[in-house]
Amino acid sequence: MPDLHWLSLAEAARLIESREVSPVELTEAALERTAAVDGELNAFIALLAETALTEASAAADEIAAGGYRGPLHGIPVGLKDIFDVAGARTTAASKAPVGHRPESDSECAKRLREAGAIILGKLNLHEIALGATGIVSSHGPARNPWDTTRITGGSSSGSGAAVASGELLAALGTDTGGSIRIPAALCGIVGIKPTFGRVSRRGLMPLSWSLDHAGPLTRTVEDAAIVLQAIAGHDPGDPASSGVEVHDYTSRIGDGVKGMRVGVGSRWFSDDLPEEIAANFREAVGVLESLGAEVREVDPPHIDEVAGAVACIMLPEAFTYHAPWLRDHADKYSEEVRFRLELGATYSADQYINSLRFREMVVEAWRQVFSQIDIVATPATMAAAGPIERSDLSTTYSLIRFTNPFNFLGTPAISVPSGFTSEGLPLGLHLTAHWFDEARVLRAAYAYEQATDWHTRRPPL
Amino acid sequence: MPSVEASANEQQKRNNIHLVLQRAGISVDAERLASLARAVDANRLATDAVARIVAGDRPPAVFRAPEPRPDA
């Protein structure tokens, strides 16, 4: 049997169901792995070892009594430290007094527990989830398992590092401009941002109510489908939650991409792209084509203006939420985050409202795109993980360019490992589809993943 | 460090930002005002482009994810 901490979630689930491995063994293996590598990675803000072992023991008893709940039963997971977990402090990785100790679970934590998952800890992030590098945190930066001198990407930095390094089999992150997909790409794992409204945000510290999404980071596409299945679905506790029926994400995941219409961008998608990233992307699209996908060119209107509109929605909303603490404790925020929050206060009502109106126009334009295309493919990022010492706010654009338009649109989008740079750093292929078509995104990503072996590589830790 | 020297127009712009922040209960020093003013200019360029686009189309200001595709 391979090291337990390197099992995929689906493999671990099969072993737990057949009682070849117990949830206690799996949780202990995760804790041992974390003890061995987290000093270097700094992925965890809080390790809930004692409660996790108690929960694992209870799960083992339940399974032994014939009460197996499904593929998350007995699986250790972690949550970015803006998800409330009852009894554990939510810090948002900020020195500003924005945190609290919740008495109840966020909806995502509640659903994970109902599925039998073991919550092992709270994970590092870019302060208040406002940043794409992952280096600004009251807990210090999370470090990339492929090269610990480099960024993980953010803002779900600890989620990316913990899953990529084998500390966890799965983690939850949030994504307002790419914060699940960027660390997934830079750490060489899978991250899916579902459709806006597909997964409840109740019990999450908001960054931007109009753009925040929650979703899983895992080592395989099948694992992402399993976790998404557990957390997706309507929640009256989140006003943006959708009542649209949740598909079965795993039963047809292996149906392939034959005949699937894959759109690749023309001008906007390729301008300024470094050759190494462009070549990796061309190769990935070639794999999809070799599997039977029909590749077509797309050039959606107004894409150049989206980034400005995203900032104009995100920053005023972030400022609005943080204003009470910013007034009295501005110096407690990091300089970078404080600057961006103050900038959020300077937008005028017409700028904000026009950005919301623009969103309607862009959504309508993309509805037309998705009447002729099934999947749109781009690189996940314009760059691999840069050195921590040389990364700052100016690094952001190269990380968010291909991810943040899909927060604006609210479409489901995934990053799946697509290879490595000449320096051995992971890259991601980004796939998006029509609203609520997570199943198709997962199917395309799974087909690509199974035709390649990038997801089987392990970082040198 | 950004320059805090400013022309009359630039000073007026910074005063406006200062007032907006003051109304929100936030005080900033001259150096921060200079940095914010530069970012505000860049943001205004971006949102002016958005304003020109929506002026021609007059969409509403609501967002809801569209219904699933029938073949999903």
Image (spheres, coloured by chain):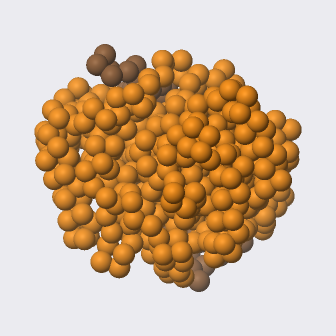
Q: Quadrant of the N terminus of chain B?
A: bottom right
Q: Is residue A49 left or right of residue A451?
A: right
In this rendered view, identify the residue nearer to me: B56 or A325: A325
- Total numbered circles: 0
Name the spot of residue A250 as percent of width and height, x first: 42, 32
In this rendered view, identify the residue nearer to me: A423 or A54: A54
Q: Is residue A33 left or right of residue A440?
A: right
Whether B64 is drawn above or below A223: the answer is above
Of all chains in the rendering, the one displayed in orange is A
Residue for point 34% across, 60% down: A454
Name the spot of residue A101 as percent of width and height, x first: 85, 47
Q: Quadrant of the C terminus of chain B?
A: top left
Residue for point 41% across, 37% down: A412
Residue for point 57% across, 52% down: A169
Asked if residue A1 can be seen in this view, the reply is yes
In this rendered view, identify the residue nearer to me: B53 or A377: A377
In this rendered view, identify the residue nearer to me: A223 or B33: A223
Name the spot of residue A240 as percent of width and height, x first: 58, 27
Whether A102 is drawn above or below A423: the answer is above
Asked if residue A366 can be seen in this view, the reply is no
Whether A133 is drawn above or below A364: the answer is below
Q: Is residue A384 left or right of residue A260?
A: right
Residue for point 71% across, 57% down: A28
Of all chains in the rendering, the one displayed in brown is B
Name the spot of residue A40 as percent of width and height, x first: 63, 76
Whether A205 is drawn above or below B19: the answer is above
